[in-house]
Image: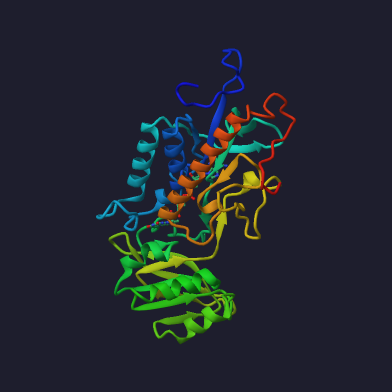
Amino acid sequence: MSDGTIATNGSGKDSQPQVENVIVVGSGPSGFTAGLYTARANLNPLLITGNDYGGQVSITYEVENYPGFPDGLSGPELVEKMKEQAEKFGTRIEFDYVTEIVTERRPFVVRTASGKEYETKSVIVCTGASPRYLNVPGEKEYTGRGVSYCGTCDGFFFRGKDVVVVGGGDSAVEEGLFLTKFATRVRIIHRRDELRASKILQHRAFANDKIEFVWNTVVTEITGDAEGKVSGVKTKDTVTGEEGFLETDGVFIFIGHLPNNELLQGKFHLDGDGHLITDSKMRTNVPGVFAAGEIMDKVFKQVATSVGQGCAAAMQAEKFLADLEDEGFPGFEDPREFVRVEGMVV
Ligand SMILES: Cc1cc2nc3c(=O)[nH]c(=O)nc-3n(C[C@H](O)[C@H](O)[C@H](O)COP(=O)(O)OP(=O)(O)OC[C@H]3O[C@@H](n4cnc5c(N)ncnc54)[C@H](O)[C@@H]3O)c2cc1C
């Protein structure tokens, strides 16, 4: 086609429903980047936002480590800039939630909570992850005002301050160790009397003068001061039931991170923690379905890395569609035929 777009199996007939080239699922950093790149490749992408527009960044008070913004900017501001840039090149954005991706046929069918159905030749899954919340009073209110779910992102703001870390696994201890670079004291509050973290991390934490442990304790409430910032945590001893209070400037919560994989279960290869498995080219086990961001990455989990993965997935989707066009869209005449891509495990 002269404009560089990929032909649909609608053969240009108005009565035929349009087949999308690519649907991006999710509106976090990886999703908007996948939208931007596929739009600039003339693929006319459709991006479906999900219920958390902007993803995790939208609940981030300030982002200081995303290159290009030396003065930092608020999470919602960054989301708006990403959206604006993706839309500028033609990404169409739908505020909806994907409930199903039918992969047993070509083109795929994407169904949404509002009852819409789209046919598409490829999908980029960018559904991200959500931190597990404590669900105690004060947690939502003080998020970004002393409550954080990311030491790498927010540790810097706690230079010379006192913080507590909630959790006892690898993330809690690793992030607790990281926070000692900034904070004067890091108290790790754990509901049991021993850690789940790996032995090596435990040794490092026990040997660190700035780290103290508060065993057999849960946080029941996060309190704030007159300026609306965290002032401390109310606690309860899990053995004696005794209630207490710890004064602190920051509460870092690391009690788990859950990939948003509801949509993917049963069809896609997931790892033991529920992350979507991809190869180095961002391909899932279903040819034509790619993934980026925290749905497939459990190591780096940053805006910058999610953006990079979104870019890579988009470039791969573009290549996939170009190859498909060269082959004359095999399988599209007969939707029951499943097209396999060489080298993929299905
Ligand atoms: C409090 C906090 C502060 C942070 N601060 C920083 C920071 O300062 N710097 C930094 O680099 N990183 C920071 N991070 C991490 C960063 O936000 C994430 O790494 C990044 O947002 C991951 O991007 P993502 O595209 O994978 O998905 P996410 O941001 O997780 O977004 C996922 C998107 O998928 C959508 N979705 C989910 N399911 C569906 C579905 N079924 N249908 C349609 N859409 C769906 C959601 O609505 C959402 O829009 C922070 C994280 C948190 C929680």
Q: How is the image coloured?
A: rainbow
Where 144 falls versus 14 (above or below)? Answer: below
Where 316 falls versus 59 (above or below)? Answer: above
Residue 300 location (% of width, % of height): 48, 60
Where 212 falls versus 298 (above or below)? Answer: below
Residue at position x 43%, y 84% from top? 208
Q: Is residue 84 visible?
A: yes
Which residue is outermost to the front? 326
Residue 340 location (% of width, % of height): 69, 40
- Quadrant in which residue 83 is drawn: top left
- How many labels, in total? 0
The reply, left or right, for residue 265 in relation to residue 198 is right
Residue at position x 55%, y 63% from top? 256
Q: Nearer the viewer, residue 83 or 188?
A: 83
The reply, left or right, for residue 281 in relation to residue 90 is right
The reply, left or right, for residue 8 in relation to residue 157 is right
Which residue is outermost to the left? 71
Q: Nearer the viewer, residue 173 or 32?
A: 32
Residue 188 location (% of width, % of height): 47, 76
Residue 49 location (% of width, % of height): 49, 38
Q: Is residue 120 visible?
A: no
Where 122 falls versus 28 (above or below)? Answer: above
The reply, left or right, for residue 73 in relation to residue 118 is left
